[in-house]
Amino acid sequence: MSKFKQLYKPLLDNAQWETPLSLAIEGTAFGHWLLEPNSLSRRLQRHCDEFTVSLIEQKKIDSTMLSADERELIGDVDCLLRKVVLMGDGQPWVFARTLIPLSTLTGQESDLEQLGEMPLGFRVFTDRSARRDALEVANTGTQAQPLWARRSRLWINNKPLLVAELFLAQAPVYSKEKQC
C-alpha cells in the first residue's frame, strides 16, 4: 500500500484547490460526488458489495509539516496524520489524507485516534454536531483523463479536522451509470 502514498500523495500536495463555483461542477455527474455534504464512505458503500478501508499510515506530526493553507484552515497545531485507501470490492477508489489537530482528540473525539480500518465518515457523521465547510476541489489529472480531488474541513463538536480525498481512476465518480 505504500505505492499509494508514493503515487498519490504528491497529487494532493500539488493540487490547485479551487472553489466548486469557480470550476462550475454543480449539476455534473462528478460534481454530485465532489459536493457530497455527508459521508463519502456511506455513499461509496452503496456502490459495492464489500466496502473496506486500508490504513496506510497514521502518525503524529509537528505543525511545521503542515502547508500554509492547511494551517490557515485548522490552525498552526500538531496533528494526527491518517492516510487510507477506500476500496469497493477490492478496487482502490479513494486515497484520503486526514489531519486531526491533537486538540480535537479530546473528550468524546479521543476515539478518532483508534479508528484503524473503520471509515472516518462512519464515525464523524454519526454525531449530530458534524458539519462540513471550506470545500475545495481540484483536477489533479488532465482534461482528457481527470483525477478529481476534494478537500474540506469537518467539524465535530466544534473541533476541526481537514480531509483531502483523491478519487482514483476506478472510483464510481467516473462511472457513466446512474449516480446515487
Image: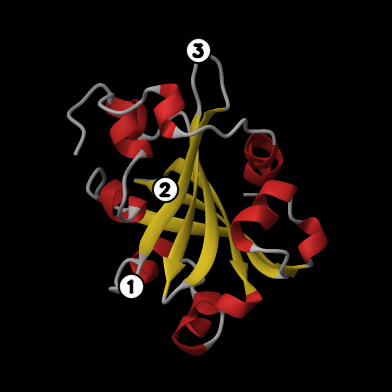
The residue depicted at 66 percent of the width and 63 percent of the height is 75
Q: Position of residue 179 (x, y in %)?
A: 21, 33
Q: Nearer the viewer, residue 76 or 149?
A: 76
* Sequence-earlier tag: 2 or 1: 2
**Mark 3 or 2, closer to the camera:** 3
> Marks 3 and 1, how far apart in space?
37 Å
User: Callout 1: 10 Å neighbours few (<14), some, many (20+)?
Assistant: few
Q: Examine the image and state in which quarter residue 30 appears.
A: top left
**Mark 3 or 1, closer to the camera:** 1
The residue depicted at 25 percent of the width and 26 percent of the height is 27
Q: Are marks 2 and 1 in contact (CB under 8 Å)?
A: no
**Residue 82 in sight here:** no
The residue depicted at 31 percent of the width and 74 percent of the height is 127
Q: Nearer the viewer, residue 79 or 166?
A: 79
Give the residue type at disc 3: Gln
User: Callout 2: 10 Å neighbours few (<14), some, many (20+)?
Assistant: many
The residue depicted at 66 percent of the width and 54 percent of the height is 72
Write down the residue under mark 1.
129
Q: Position of residue 122 (x, y in %)?
A: 34, 66
Q: Residue placed farthest to the top in the image?
A: 144
Q: Position of residue 47 (x, y in %)?
A: 25, 43
**Mark 2 or 1, closer to the camera:** 1
Give the residue type at disc 1: Ser
Write down the residue under mark 2.
87
Q: Nearer the viewer, residue 93 or 150?
A: 150
Write down the residue under mark 3.
143
Q: Examine the image and state in which quarter residue 7 appears.
A: top right
> Marks 3 and 2, how far apart in space?
25 Å
